[in-house]
Amino acid sequence: EAAINRIAAGEVVERPASAVKELVENAIDAGAARIAVDIAEGGKVLIRVTDDGHGIAEADLPLALARHATSKIDGTDLLNIHSFGFRGEALPSLGAVGRLTVTSRAAGAAAAAAISVEGGAIAPPRPAALTRGTVVELRDLFYATPARLKFLRSTRAEAQAIADTIRRLAMAEPGIGFTLRDLRDGDARTVLRLDAETGDLFDAMRARLSRILGAEFAENAIPLEAEREGVRLTGYAALPTYARGSSQAQYLFVNGRPVRDKLLSGALRAAYMDVLPSGRYPAAVLFVDLPPVEVDVNVHPAKAEVRFRDAGTVRGLIVSGLRHALAAEGH
Ligand code: ADP
Ligand code: MG
């Protein structure tokens, strides 16, 4: 069983940044207002994610670490299981590839409890000190699989990938405060600090994007809002005058989660076709929200791929939404 878990875990946890993605997503799902990530040695030695969300009841702690246990789907939701992709995989996978400790205090609980798993063996919960929320600590990633450890990149590159992962997740959650700290020689260096943004959604989004993509993007970006057949598009797209030399500043989120899909670059190209010189790429951050049954997120657990049931509608919505917004600005 431990071996099977380890193989399956490799699918979910490719590198420290994938562990951070899973843990931060869990904290977001728990309704956290602040999420703090601490790492050591590019996450290879330590990843610690602290949140102030609703926590996990002591009785549920062993369940949270068990395979395919998720609190996010109940029996009435069977049809949606596939759409949500791989569920209840993250914590057990992390427990299979590193030394994992989850400390939590459920909202309203009298005390906190902690549970650890090492080499697939889950110890019983023990009393712990924590005022609220959850702390997940993953130490010594891939310690039992030196071959995987060898494939990791430099500490600097892994730390960079973690920062990118947090920036990307934070784009979709302007109301949540994020920090990333690098622990070294007893010192904590703040790498990233994104305070919670307030105000209406578009103001908060613009402010958050300004912090992440730069003030120049935010100043040159126009808000998008469109809907078609139950699919909703929001976000910001840069004016043609702010075109980039690469397609790197193009971000797509589906139901709040960052994804990669060729549909995005194609739709952006089509929408800006008449207003951008060739060799220039539009910058945009697009949020597509649609009923979960209309999309498979996480076709593969580690790669953020999506499969739309009706890709044509989504593409059409993005192209027309962008064209409309650009035309309103005189482009
Ligand atoms: P999933 O997120 O797909 O449900 P995970 O393995 O990531 O699966 O987490 C298992 C369960 O543990 C979640 O469904 C949730 O109930 C609980 N959990 C994990 N992390 C947190 C957290 N930070 N706060 C509250 N509950 C959590
Ligand atoms: Mg999860």
Image (cartoon, rainbow, N blue to C red):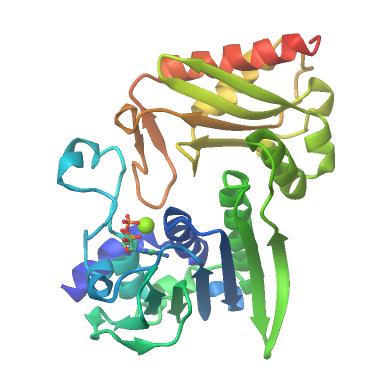
In the displayed structure image, the side of residue 78 where residue 37 appears, left or right? right
Instruction: Residue 36: give x, y in percent of width and height.
Output: 58, 68
Task: Pick the quarter of the image with the N terminus.
Answer: bottom left
In the displayed structure image, the side of residue 204 where residue 306 appears, left or right? left
Q: 108 or 206, which lies in front?
A: 108
Question: Which image quarter has ligand 2?
Answer: bottom left
For residue 89, what is the image quadrant?
bottom left
Count of labels in the image? 0
- Image point 51% across, 74% down: which residue? 47
Residue 99 in view of the camera = no
Instruction: Residue 207: give x, y in percent of width and height.
Output: 74, 43
Instruction: Residue 112: give x, y in percent of width and height.
Output: 38, 81
In the displayed structure image, the side of residue 142 where residue 24 appears, left or right? right
Task: Pick the quarter of the image with the C terminus.
Answer: top right
- Image point 30% across, 71% down: which residue? 57
Q: 80 or 314, which lies in front?
A: 80
Q: 186 or 305, which lies in front?
A: 186
Residue 326 drawn above or below residue 125? above
For residue 11, what is the image quadrant?
bottom left
Residue 292 in view of the camera = yes
- Image point 60% across, 15% down: which residue? 321
Instruction: Residue 109: give x, y in percent of width and height.
Output: 35, 75
Residue 186 drawn above or below residue 145? below
- Image point 50% across, 29% down: which residue? 288
